[in-house]
Amino acid sequence: MKSPDTFQNLTRKIFRVTTTIQSLYPELYFLLNETPLWMSSNDKNITLQDLKQYLTTIRMQLITFKKDKK
């Protein structure tokens, strides 16, 4: 069953993907600094859609990076 999209769940998913990238693909992790991230911890207007979009972006980067490594 899919977990509901809440701030906590999306943040957890982002953390998991980021941790995977950091441990398995450090060269990609370095490039995440170049991934546009318009959100900050002080921003009160972060929406679920913003988090979903960021999660999708880093997942796609990981998938593309894995394909390119083969």
Image (cartoon, rainbow, N blue to C red):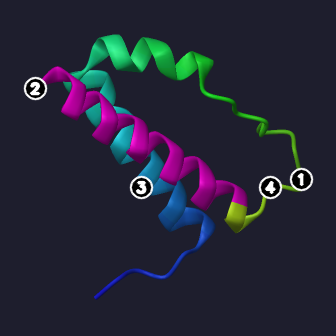
Q: Nearer the viewer, residue 23 or 61?
A: 61
Three-letter amino acid code at disc 1? Lys
Q: Are marks 1 and 2 in contact (CB under 8 Å)?
A: no
Give the x, y percent position of residue 34. Answer: 60, 18
Q: Is residue 64 left or right of residue 49?
A: left
Q: Are marks 1 and 4 in contact (CB under 8 Å)?
A: yes
The label nearer to you, 4 versus 2, is: 2
Q: Which residue matches tag 3?
A: 13
Q: Which residue matches tag 2?
A: 70
Of label 4 and label 2, which has the lower sequence position? 4
Q: Residue at x 70, y 65 (%)?
A: 49
Give the x, y percent position of residue 32. Answer: 51, 22
**Mark identifier at residue 44:** 1
**Mark identifier at residue 68:** none
Q: Are marks 4 and 2 in contact (CB under 8 Å)?
A: no
The label nearer to you, 2 versus 3, is: 2
- Tell me the magenta residue range: 50-70
Q: Residue at x 29, y 41 (%)?
A: 63
Q: Is residue 54 left or right of residue 18?
A: right
